[in-house]
Image: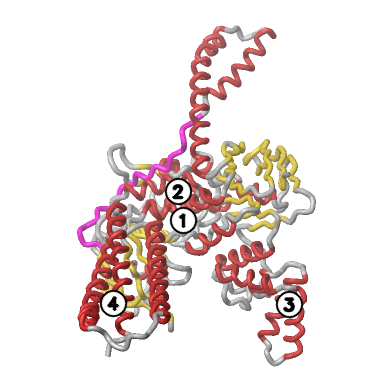
Amino acid sequence: MNYLSVENIAKSYGARKLFEGVSFGLAEGEKAALVARNGSGKTTMLRILAGVEEPDQGLVTFRKGIRVEFLSQEPDLVPERSILQSVLAVDNPMTQAILEYEEALENPNQAEAYQRAFEKMDRLKAWDFEGQVKTVLGKLGLHQVHQKIAPLSGGQKKRVALARILISSPDLLILDEPTNHLDLDMIEWLEAYLGQKGKTLLMVTHDRYFLESVCDIILELEDQKLYKHPGNYTAFLERKAERQEAEASKVDKARNLMRKELEWMRRQPKARGTKSKARIDAFGELKKVAHTDLGEDELKLNIKMTRLGSKIIEVHKLRKAYGDKLILDSFNYVFKKGEKAGIVGPNGVGKSTLMRLITKQEEADGGKVIIGDTVQFGFYTQGGLNLKEDKRVIDVVKDIAEYIPREGKGGDLSASQLLERFLFDGDKQYTYVSKLSGGEKRRLYLCTILMANPNFLILDEPTNDLDILTLNVLEDFLLEFPGCVLVITHDRFFMDKISDHLFVFEGNGELRDFPGNYSEYRAALKEEAEKKRLRESSQVKVKKAVAEKPKEKTKLTYAERLEFEALEGEIESLEEERASLASDLESSATDAEKVMEISQKLEQVQSALEEKELRWLELSEFAE
């Protein structure tokens, strides 16, 4: 049975039509994603479904009795409430009991209030629910639960709103960009949480790994119409390609037929008879089909890059701390021409700080950064999106330059031509910035960054709010970009495609240089964790075996003593070999065949080491 039914809805703003004739349903347990280009009306459609806006026509109905929750781009939270009060702002006895219990914990002198709260938690069996609340808050990095909402950043408020929705466990979740403002660990947790069987959701997201692993329906909004694709992101790409091929064939046939019809139309006298009216009307429809533009708009970024010399950036013993919080401790690195690095770590660990230190926008506490004479930065920052709302799009570009040099032949690009390559067509160029969607503003901001012909791109969360088409072409551009790229992004697909190595913040000022992309890094972490588990398990087995072994012997034989003395050297040798293989494994992370070979050898060495350690412990019981 459908949880949600949408019938023939339409929405326009003035002369600008977003969509019309949109109909679809969402059944219990289905997980759907709405994908479209920026400015196509994705957020507007979600707001209509959530009841925040009204459609111009059509009907949205929900199954009677179900609870629906909507996560908006800018959640409405009460500033005076605490984080805990906000996430438990649901009118039911269990959440009220948790609030009273937490308040009692904050006031230990009020013994009677604590006892009443404790008994109420017992009576309502709210302890398990309290554990779930703390798990969700912890996974979303909301540890200071008594902090007020007012001073929180926009990203923190979005996480509070997300936590509230998840904790309230609605029947249907409607989520607008739920992964924005989450770090990579949070995204992976949310992916697993929403992927659970039985959850029903409709969301807008551009996270392609999320679309691949969570969704079983993709709703594509294109040319004001909605297409429903069963399956995940891969299935969507396959079906869309098939549809485009079919449409291309239809257009080709229409164009051939149109030539014949055009000859007939030109032969007709000006006073056409009524017998020809049906054919004339059909010609009008045929003309629309024949003139259909099936070519995907391309974000062509062939802007000329400033020449980059041999000396780029050298970082020597860089140190940075904020009070007791150590960000970097003696970090050293020399950037090479053409390298593309990602920066990975939890929110607040210092990723953006590293970018500002490298570009000397922030002073280090120690060490130095040497920047080559030819380095020209293009710095795309999270806080840099401060375009003037009262300006037209074309004026934003013209304020920087009327013409922009580009690679190859063909002369310079005019401001208008450049905007067309950034998917701003003629009409859109004269739109006020205030009328652009969030993704369109980011695309325009990216345009202004690239106009300076940089050769070292610093990109701090460039993927937020960008549609999949823009992301694809931006990725292709960055892969061909001959300069250096340093990027922070929560988009794992983007990071995997762009980066050839990672700077990983590991805490206490440590910054690890990992030779691979994000998926390879996560695989390496899982492998390290598994090895640690096996080592700890083997040590437990050894201790247990020693503890259970009968101790009737009192001393070693001569042969056993020789064996015991030799074992120490053998164990030391095997430990050195294990360390060497582990190092080889890390440096060969990008070579799958070599990784497999080293892993097998490492497993053999570990097995031999465990056997020797067990024998050494056995003999040590009787050694004098």
Q: Which residue is mark 2?
A: 471
Q: Nearer the viewer, residue 152 or 553?
A: 553
Cα separation between marks 1 and 2: 10 Å
**Distance in Å between CA atoms under marks 3 and 4:** 54 Å
For label 4, the SS is strand
SS for dot 3:
helix
Query: Which residue is more in the foreground, 267 or 360?
Result: 360
Structural distance between the alpha carbons of marks 4 and 1: 32 Å
**Image spot of residue 405 (x, y percent):** 32, 46
Location of mark 1 (residue): 491
What are the residue bounds of the magenta stretch?
Answer: 293-312
Q: CA distance from mark 2 to mark 4?
A: 36 Å
| Label pair 4/1, CB-CB below 8 angstroms | no
Prevailing SS of the magenta stretch: loop
The disc labelled 4 sits on which kind of residue? Gly
Give the mark nearest the N terminus, 4 or 1: 4
- The reply to whether the C-beta atoms of the residues labelled 1 and 2 are less than 8 Å apart is yes
Mark 3 → mark 1, Cα distance in angstroms = 40 Å
